[in-house]
Amino acid sequence: MAPQIRRVRSDEWPQVRAFRLAALLDEAAPIAFLETHDVAADRPDEFWQERAAGASAGETAAQLVAEVDEAWAGTATVLVTPAGTPDFHGRVTEHRRATVVGVYVDPRHRGSGVIDALLDAAADWTGTLGIAELALDVHADNARAQAAYRRAGFVPTGGSFVGRIGPEIDMVRSLRP
Ligand SMILES: CC(C)(COP(=O)(O)OP(=O)(O)OC[C@H]1O[C@@H](n2cnc3c(N)ncnc32)[C@H](O)[C@@H]1OP(=O)(O)O)[C@@H](O)C(=O)NCCC(=O)NCCS
């Protein structure tokens, strides 16, 4: 069944929390996410309420969820960093930058096209802001994620850096027609 992709609603903060905690228990989590399960599990409800609210509306963040049979099957979030402002890695860019983060597909739905649908929706949302490309960082050892991103039109920029979880490479998907 084709996934339905939509933006998260602010009242869904308990699902945002539960899905994130499940992602942080994934065997790939150490090369996928910047925080640990224990850190996330200790965050108060207000954190998840603010996260869901901030990602449900406006032009700063958009969390997209994929639903299959009305259950969450995957998620991806686009963060928009204004020009001259440090991003979540502390990097400053000259232009407003859109970055995909928090990418996770429930293992029962992997290999089914959920990730492609999420990344297409992320690209569509970013395009509505007038931003010309969608960026992401992926761990050098996360071969499965890299392959999925390449299939979805992301190409390595040649840039790399060592972040909090180790060596990462930069990839971008052009949104120009
Ligand atoms: C990364 C993730 C979102 C990808 O979604 P998915 O549904 O698993 O992706 P798909 O199965 O559609 O595609 C995976 C690709 O990797 C390939 N692949 C699978 N296992 C692989 C492995 N161990 N090494 C290299 N490539 C692998 C597949 O063949 C496929 O490539 P292809 O289309 O060229 O054949 C999902 O695996 C996930 O949630 N992983 C855990 C969290 C994570 O790593 N998030 C990304 C953080 S940057």
Image (cartoon, rainbow, N blue to C red):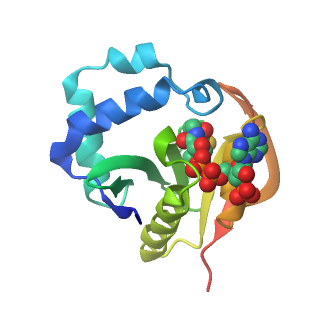
Provide residue 140's location: percent of width, then percent of height.
Answer: 78, 37
Q: Residue at x 50, y 24 (%)?
A: 35
Would residue 146 be seen by someone viewing this image from the given angle?
no
Q: From the viewer's perspective, is 91 left or right of 36?
A: right
Q: Quadrant of the C terminus?
A: bottom right
In the image, residue 26 above or below residue 133 = above
Q: From the viewer's perspective, is 145 left or right of 16?
A: right
The mark total stands at 0
* Location of residue 148 by image quarter: bottom right
> Among all residues in the image, which is located at the extreme bottom?
177
Q: Residue at x 59, y 73 (%)?
A: 132
> Among all residues in the image, which is located at the extreme left?
11
Q: Residue at x 29, y 55 (%)?
A: 69
Q: From the viewer's perspective, is 119 left or right of 162?
A: left
* Location of residue 176 by image quarter: bottom right
Closest to the observer: 76 or 71? 71
Q: Quadrant of the N terminus?
A: bottom left
Provide residue 136's location: percent of width, then percent of height.
Answer: 62, 51
Q: Residue at x 79, y 43 (%)?
A: 160
Would residue 7 be seen by someone viewing this image from the given angle?
yes
In the image, residue 45 above or below residue 112 = above
